[in-house]
Structure formats: C-alpha cells, structure tokens
Amino acid sequence: MKQKITIKTISKELGVSTSTVSKALRDSHEISAETKERIKAYADFFNYKPNNLALQLRNQKTKVIGVILPKIVHHFFSTVIKGIEKGASEKGYHIMVCFSNESYQSEVDNLKVLSNGSVDGLLISVAKETLQNEDFKHLQDLVNEEIPLVMFDRVLDSIDCDKVIVDDIGGGYKATKHLIEQGRKRIAMLSTPAHVNIGVLREKGYTRALKEFNLLESSNLAIEVDDNSDLKEQIFKVIDKDIDAIFAVNEIYAAVAIRAIREKGMKVPEDISVVGFTDGLISEYSSPSITAIVQHGFTMGKQAVELLIDRIENESENLPPATKVISSTLNIRESS
Amino acid sequence: MKQKITIKTISKELGVSTSTVSKALRDSHEISAETKERIKAYADFFNYKPNNLALQLRNQKTKVIGVILPKIVHHFFSTVIKGIEKGASEKGYHIMVCFSNESYQSEVDNLKVLSNGSVDGLLISVAKETLQNEDFKHLQDLVNEEIPLVMFDRVLDSIDCDKVIVDDIGGGYKATKHLIEQGRKRIAMLSTPAHVNIGVLREKGYTRALKEFNLLESSNLAIEVDDNSDLKEQIFKVIDKDIDAIFAVNEIYAAVAIRAIREKGMKVPEDISVVGFTDGLISEYSSPSITAIVQHGFTMGKQAVELLIDRIENESENLPPATKVISSTLNIRESS
DNA sequence: ATAACATACGAAACCGATTTCGTGTTAACA
DNA sequence: TGTTAACACGAAATCGGTTTCGTATGTTAT
C-alpha cells in the first residue's frame, strides 16, 4: 500500500502544527479563513482521508456492528443480513459478518475477536452445537462486560439481553389451521429433533391448532426427522399412515415431501396438501408452488439492529432487556 | 459498555510500568519469571484482552478484508461469501461485508469508508449501475493508492488488478452441447439484456456450440429477457417457435420456463428439455429437478480471497495482476 | 497608556497498545 | 577493587488523529 498522507505530512509541508491542520479540516472557528483555505486545498489536492482506526481509537467507538451467524447459504439468514445491513447503514453503521458454521468453537473464537474493541455491539444467532452443549459462558461474559448484545432467531432464555424472535408457535398454528380449514383431517408434521428449538415451537403451534379443532386424537402425526438417515424414506413412512396433509418445518422438507407424494402416485394438493415453513425461492418457484409461512427475515434483521443501535447510543438509560416477536404470515400457493 | 481493563490499569494496580506489563504478557525474556507470573495472574483474573484498534493502529494492519457485493439474497453470492469467509478465516483474517444493492452511489460510499484504514484489502463485485454508468474512477483511485484489490464475478477490463471470474463462455457451451447431444435441434436461449455481461458471455458459448454442430441456421433462438415485462409471457412466445430445448441464463428463468411449458400442455423433458445456469436450491428441489451449470461460487470466493491475502502479505514482490478463471461444470438432473 | 479581550495558533495530553533505548542493580571476572 | 556483563525494568517514541489549554499578537475600551 502506498504511504498514506496524514495530518502530520500536511502540517510539515505547510509549516503549521498538527492541531491547526486538524482544526482547519474540521472547520474550527479558531483558525483563520485563509489558513483554512490553504490547508483544505492541500488536503483536497492530495486526497487526504482521515484514518479510521485512529478516529475509532480516539472516539472509543467504531460505528461497526458485529454479526455472528450460524450459516449464510440459507435464504432466511441472507434475508436477515440484508435487513441488518439496511438498518445499520441507515444509521451510519457498518457490519462485520462472521460465521460460526454451527460450531461452538468457531462461535467462541469469533466472539473473542469481535468483542475486543472492533465493534460497538453484537448481533448473534446461536450455533446448533452451542445449543446442544448448553455452554453459554462466552455469551454470559459478553453480558457481564456490558457489551451491547442482541440475540435473534436462535436465542437463549438464560442470557439477559435484547432478543428478536420469530413467532414460531403462531406460525405452526396458522399453517395447521389453514390445512384444517381446507377440510384436512389427518395432518402430519415433519419436525426437527427435540434439541432444535424451532421444531419444538412450531410443533406446539401445530398441536394447539389440532386441539382447538378437536383433531388431536385423529391427527397428531408429528415425526422428528433424523438428518442422518434418508429424508425421503422417512417421508414415505409418514405418507403410508393414510394422511391428507403435511406441515413441514422447513422449505426443503416440504419440497422433498411433494416429490415423495408424487412418487407414491398421489397428487398435490388433490390427495395431500403441503404447507412449508420459511418462504424462500424453493416455495416460490417449484411446481406446484408451495404454500408457506413467511418468516420476514428482513424485518427481523432490521429490528434487531435497530434495537442494538438504540442500546449503543442510549447506554445511560439502562432499560431492561426487551424481546420482540416478529409475527409470521401465511403465503397461500398451489400446494394447498 | 463497562470500562475495559487496559494495560495502564494493570500497570497502576501492580505498580509497574506499562512497558513491563506489555512485555510480561508477551512473555518477553526481559521480564523476570515472578513478575510475569504476577502480571499474568492479574490479567487472567480480570479477563484482560488487548484492544484491537490499538493493535491495528500500531501494526498498520487490521487483518480484516472488506467485501463489497451487489446483493446478498442470492444463492450464488451467498455461496461466494461462504468461500471468502472460509479462505479468510483459514489465514486469520476477518471479513467486513457491505452491499451496494446494485447502486453506484452505495458502492462509492462503501468503498470510501472501507479504504480509510479499516481493511487491509478489498474484494469487489461491481454493481449493475456502475457497469452501466461506466464511471470507474472510484476503483481506479483504489488501484492508484495501491490498496490491494481483487475483483470477482463482475469485473472490469479497464481496471488493472487481480480478477477471478466464472467461465461463462465455457458454461454456455457445455450446457448447449449437452442439449445437442441429447438430440435436440431447436434450442432456445433465455438471455439477459446486452449490458449485463454474463448474458453476453453465456450466449457466446451457446452460439459456439451451435456453430460446432452446424445448428446455427436452424437453432440460434436467443432472446433477451426484459425484466420489466412479464417473464412468463415472453417465454410463451419462445415456446411457440416450435423448440425442443431451452437454455436459461439463470435458475429462475429455468424454473419459470418449466412452469410455462407445462401450462402449454407439454412435458419436461419429453417435449422440451430445460437447462439452467447457477445450480442453487431451486434446481435441486424443484420437480423435475433442473439440469444446471454449477458455478462453484464457493471456489470463486475462496480463490479470490487467497489471491488478495497473497497480495497483502507479499506486497514487495509486485507481481503483475493475474486473472483466474473458475471453470463451470454441468450437473445433469431430470429436466434434460 | 494600560487593562481587557478577541484572534490565531502551538504544545501537549489522550486513546491503548508495542518497542527501542537507556539505566540502576547485582553478579562475575580479572 | 575496578570493569564488565547480565538482568530487570522504566521512559519515551510511535501509530494518526482530536481536544484542552496556554500564549503571543493585535485590537478595543477606559
């Protein structure tokens, strides 16, 4: 990198002190008009730009927000990032993104680096491994150090900070209710293993809807999908239970379910309706297009970052942590 | 944020100088074993972590790489990011991600902020608007300042820096050749407007394949899709030209094409084969699943960042700029 | 003529680290 | 006993800015 021009360079060249240069560039009244002119002209000509690091160190703020995500190649999370970036840039902040890749150690490492002055605050969605480990010391430390922190999507009850979550229960309820209103009686659910929180919550909504319509006895066909064995085989078994609808905990399960149903010689939605969770490109462009619960990732990201910036800029107020719930909506398409 | 513990705090508390503390923590031989012990114990106990900003300012390097992308909610780009992050973290770097949202002004603004010392180098994929404007001053400035820069995917010939691109011509060629080998004779292509480079290049590959098999007269059915009017209508017109295959410039066009073909009462792949470009979730999970050119975004991101870090760490060598071409492969599925 | 004050600028501290260089103490050696 | 070297540590410069405070000069009021 070419040697950058600094205030010191300018001050030497023009025979003034660094304080004068600094003040002149910031248009201080302490400096005479002609001196200002001279300095500004010189700075302009040589394309002087103040060094960010120096400013950040001096001001004790970076205007950078750290974001730690479990993964990126995922429609929901990339939507969340977009929301975060939008909200951040609107308030003059930049974002520094790291990925835990669902790994506990990665999460800890990233946290350590980011929390050392590089950022003014952190946005975190916890890795799966961390959820399983149940070791949250790194996050508790953050809270203890009073570093502004907002958790989103995958949050921990035991950590005392602002949170933004999707209304998973409500989503599960809406999806199931929709199927019931379409006249479906035997509604299966493809859920996740119990340690993944979202599956549990969405299932809760599913059960609530069934209960409300007195279908708990006849329906209640939830299975926990095992990611380690073949997905389609597991779905085949569900189909064999003489069902007329499937509520899938995510888009991919829904897409694979449709394929499985067809392979069994049945039609969607005539024989079996399918509703997914997460409204991404698959739901939109597959044929038939898939009815799905929209998670509003963009809104979630934007709200999370706004909450965080609010914390950062109004530290003194010391308000108690808040939890925002982003409600989900149903996008009805061809599969139901 | 709670007042952070600094070297100065430690030095005051233990009655030694800051130099001693710094040296002790870095395990310098200049410091006696017992003093080291005392200082380390204290630092450990109060969870001392050196301030990143101070280090970065001192060392004149940040170990951060700036990334500017046109968009994020896009399978290809999120894959690229993943590759970038992987390559970066392997070498101890972090990434700072910004989005231009395809806007020229956004790109310029982001560039300005990042290039002021916050990062050691930059990775850029140019915004559409910038490509149209043909105003590349901001990028030329970067090169003039000798800030390490690697452009990827959407690159500019006129800027003298390292580049990583997808082999779009080869991809178009492979896709078309595959269709020809399946016995297709009248192959349509859904391309982009001429100012979008990728469409032009992929079309070049398409034409080359047709020429090679002497189908240029009979086939050569490329249309430029107009994003402002209805996509499906445009595809209907193409189908009416009595074609037996479609090569779509991206996944979405391919998915919509399949839907249009079905609505016309024809079958995929029996009546019309479809091949897409960009192998994302849509191609994988739609039914029929879509044969597609895999772009290897991950590889592209990883190679780009490795090229960049090489530049950063071996500045002195001053090698001439290189351009890497990531070759694409065909992933054959049900649609062809 | 002198006190009072505004003007225009510089010196120095500060943000939080690292590192070079200098120095006082002690031990070893001639 | 005097010289030298090793040891252990501190002072100060540095990275690139900002800001407080002090001060020389000129202007105005008394």
Image: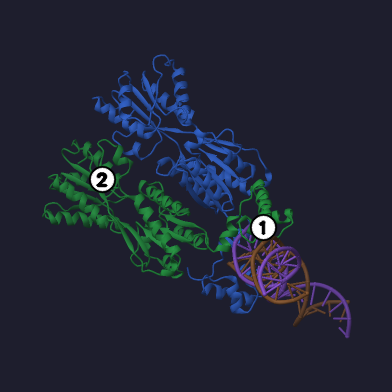
Chain colours: A green, B blue, C brown, D purple
- Vertical comparison of C2 with C17: above or below: below
Quadrant the C terminus of chain A occupies: top left
Of residue A92 and residue A181, the one placed in the foreground of this image is A92
Residue A34 lies left or right of residue A121; in this view the side is: right
Instruction: Return the mark for residue A292.
Output: 2
**Residue at x-position 57% and y-position 36%:** B323
Residue A103 lies left or right of residue B4; in this view the side is: left
**Mark 1: amino acid:** Ser
Classify mark 2: residues with Cα within 10 Å, few (<14), some (14-19) or many (20+).
many
Where is residue A107? Give x, y as percent.
44, 59
The answer for which chain carries disc 1 is A
Of residue A214 and residue A328, the one placed in the foreground of this image is A328
| Residue B314 appearing in the image | no
Q: Check disc 1 and report the residue beneath it.
A: A32
Classify mark 1: residues with Cα within 10 Å, few (<14), some (14-19) or many (20+).
few
- Vertical comparison of B111 with C9: above or below: above
The reply to whether dot 1 and dot 2 touch (C-beta < 8 Å) is no
Are callouts 1 and 2 both on one chain? yes
Q: CA distance from mark 1 to mark 2?
A: 65 Å
